[in-house]
Each structure stands twice: as structure tokens, then as C-alpha cells.
Amino acid sequence: YTFWGRSFVEVYLSDVPRSGTLAVTIFAISMFIGRLLTSFFTSKYSLKKIIFSSSILGIIVGFILPYADSILEFNLLISLSGLATACLWPSILSEASSILNFDKTILMILLACAGVIGFGFTPLLMGIIGDNSQLKYGFILAPIFFSIIIGLMHFENKS
């Protein structure tokens, strides 16, 4: 969202670059708020429920966001995307360390490496989709990745 959000605002909403930068800032602030909320909710709900709920929110918002037709609507959806994404990195690390028999430091390094690859690969794939069709269709990757998280959680529960 952070990489292509600004372009979406300029291309589809025909707004000034400053508005696109504001959308990225809104996403970041929402992630901050989401992480604070996650720390509050972990005393009441399991991490699996929090990750699952965040992923469902991410799927719903991810399918709606490419069709935003105003800057206000886009900023609202991008803030919900930030909330949906916020818990994933720390919660997945914590959940993985409770399930896997790995040294926690090594696990953090492995997950960080996977995150760096994902952070580089996803915008590239979005750009390829945008070059071959329309940029807004590249945003559909977010709900796909959230669905993969839910699928992996389901697979983990079966084993």
C-alpha cells in the first residue's frame, strides 16, 4: 500500500502528489494505532483470533480499495488497511515462536528476511500487473496475501 498508494491517488483520483503522501502517512499512523490496539487485545483474545480478524478486515478492505473514487474514501480505506496490517509482523513472530521449536533470535532473523523479500517482491508484482492492465488491479494482491495467511493458519490447525 505504501509504495503504490501515492500513485493510485495521482492516477485514479487525479489529486496532487501531496494527497498521495498524506495517504501513506495515514496508513503509517493507522499501523501505529493498530499495534497499540493489538497489545491491548492480546490480554483478551488469542493471537490467532487477532491475526484471523485482521486478515478478514484486510481481505474486505483490499477488495474495495481499488474502486475508491474519492480521496476521502481512499484515505478511509487506507487507514483500515493499516489497521488490518498492523498486527501481522509482531503477532506472526510471536505465534511462530510458540509453535516452532526454533531459537527465537534465529526465527526473528528468518522472518525478517522473508519480510524483506516480500516487501521487495510485492510492489514489483503490483507494478507488473499495473503495466499489463491497470494499477488498481495490482492492489488485489493484498487480499490474496491475507487469504494465504488464513489458509496457513487453517493448515497449521489441522497438523
Image (cartoon, grey):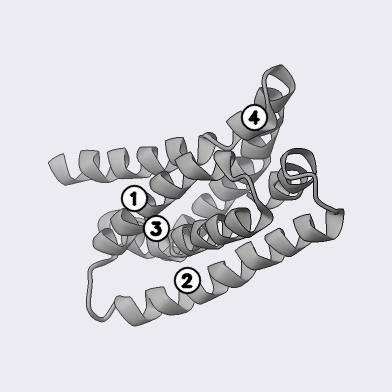
Indicate which label's residue lies in the foreground, 1 or 3: 1
Relative image position of residue 126 (x, y in whole percent): 65, 32
The three-letter code of the residue at mark 1 reads: Ile
Does residue 37 sit above or below 73 in this rendering?
A: below
> Real-space Cα distance between discs 4 and 3?
23 Å
Task: Describe residue 85's horizontal placement relative to residue 7 as left or right.
Answer: left
Element assignment for label 2: helix
Element assignment for label 1: helix
| Residue sitting at x 74%, y 22% | 131
Query: Hey, which quadrant is residue 45 in on the image?
Result: bottom left
Q: Quadrant of the C terminus?
A: top left
Judge the density around disc 3: few (<14), some (14-19), many (≥20) Cα neighbours within 10 Å: some
Res. 34 mark? 2
Nearest the viewer among 126 and 19 is: 19
- Which mark sits nearer the N-terminus, 1 or 3? 1
- Residue contact between numbered discs 4 and 2, judged by CB atoms under 8 Å: no
Number of numbered discs on residues: 4
The residue lying furthest to the left in this view is 158
| Residue sitting at x 42%, y 64% | 104
Element assignment for label 3: helix
Task: Describe residue 112's horizontal placement relative to residue 63 as left or right.
Answer: right
Q: Which residue is mark 1?
A: 56
